[in-house]
Amino acid sequence: MSNLDRTPDLSVCGGRAGVATAPVHEVFAGREVLLGESTKVRRLLPNLGRRLVGPWCFVDHYGPDDIAAGPGMQVPPHPHMGLQTVSWLLSGEVHHRDSLGNDQLIHPGELGLMTSGHGIAHAEQSPVPHPALLHGVQLWVALPDQTREVSPGWSHHAALPRFADAGVTTTVIMGELAGAASPGQAYSPIVGADVALDPDADALLPLEPDFEHAVLTTLGTLDVDGVELTPGSMLYLGCGRRDLRLRSASGARILLLGGEPLGEQIVMWWNFVGRSSDEIAAAREQWMRGERFGAVAGGGDPLAAPPMPPGRLKPGGAVR
Ligand code: MN
C-alpha cells in the first residue's frame, strides 16, 4: 500500500511525551482516502490525535468491497524506507511484487511482511482474475533507529499461531500474545492480532501492561472495555492494562495493535519514515532519479513522488 495523497503532510511524531501511560478511551474516526483510481480506504493512523501506537505508524482499512466488475486494488511501484509493511486480508487476494524480485499472492489469514530498511520498492495489485470481495488492512511499523538501515526483505507466513477459547479465535500476526509468537521478524516489542468473536462472545484478552494498545473493528459491532466500536473507527487504549474485556452480541472481528512506545522522534512523509526532513528529501530525490530503491518487474510505471511541502521540521520534544 502506498500513501497516494498528492499533498502529504510532513509529520514529526513519537517520543514518550504523547503516550498515555494509564488506560484511556480515545475514539478516532477514520479519514476516507482514495488509493489509486479504484480503492477507497479508511485511514485510522496517523490521525489528528495520535501518530503512533507502540511502533505502529500507519493503519489503512479497506473494504469489504465488491470488485467483481472492476480492477480492484491498483497500487503501482512505490518506495519505502525506515519501516515494515504488514499486509493482512480478510477477503480476496493481493499480488505483491518487489524490487528484490519477490512475487507473492497473499490470501486471507496470511502475513505478508516487508521490511524496507534502507530501501525497497513494491507494487500491490488485485490479480486477474480476482475474487469478488476485497477486504483487508495495510499497516506500517516504524523501525527503531538502531535497525532502520537493515537490508530490505520480504517474508510470507501462511501459518500463524491461532488459538480459540470461549467463542473467541485469536491469530497472532506480529509479536507475541498470550504466549504465542508470530514467525514474522519484529525489531521492537510489538503485538498485532486478529480477534474473531462469535455471537454472544464475552472474553478477556490478556495484554502486556507496558504496551500501548489500540483496537479497530473490521467486521461487526462490539463492546471494548465498555465502548461500542463499529467499523471505520479506532479506539486508543493507552498503556497500563493487563487485559481487555471484549463483548459482542452480533459477532465481530477486530485488530489489536500495540507495542512498547517507540520512544524516538520520527519524521514521516509520503512512504518514508526517517529522522529529519533533509533525509526524507534526499530519499525522495533518489526515488525520482531511479536510485536506491530498485525496480519492480511488472506492476506498471513507478509512482512519482509528490512535491515536498515548504519549510523544514526538526524532530524535538521529550525522548526517553
Ligand atoms: Mn507500500
Image: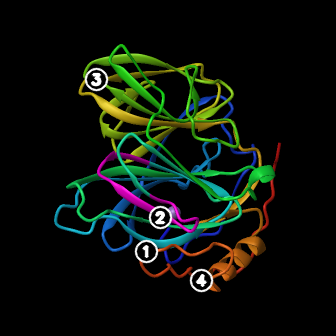
Q: CA distance from mark 2 to mark 3?
A: 35 Å
Q: Which residue is mark 2?
A: 97
Tell me the crowding category of disc 3: few under 14, some 14 to 19, or many 20 or more residues within 10 angstroms, Cα based. some
Which element carries disc 2, helix, strand or loop? strand
Nearest to N terminus: mark 4 or mark 3: 3
Judge: label 1 CB < 8 Å from ligand 1. no
Query: Helix or strand or loop: what does disc 3 sit on?
Result: loop
- The residue type indicated by label 1 comes to Gly
Mark 4 C-beta closer than 8 Å to ligand 1: no
Q: Quadrant of residue 117?
A: bottom right
Q: Are marks 2 and 1 in contact (CB under 8 Å)?
A: yes
Tag 2 near tag 3, CB within 8 Å: no
- Residue range (magenta): 88-103
Kindly report the distance in space between the C-alpha atoms of the residues bearing marks 2 and 4: 25 Å
The label shown at residue 198 is 3
Number of marks: 4
Of helix, strand and loop, which one carries label 1? loop
> Which of the two marks, 3 or 1, is nearer to us in this view?
1
Residue 90 covered by magenta stretch: yes
Location of mark 4 (residue): 307
Q: CA distance from mark 4 to mark 3?
A: 47 Å
> Element type at marker 4?
loop
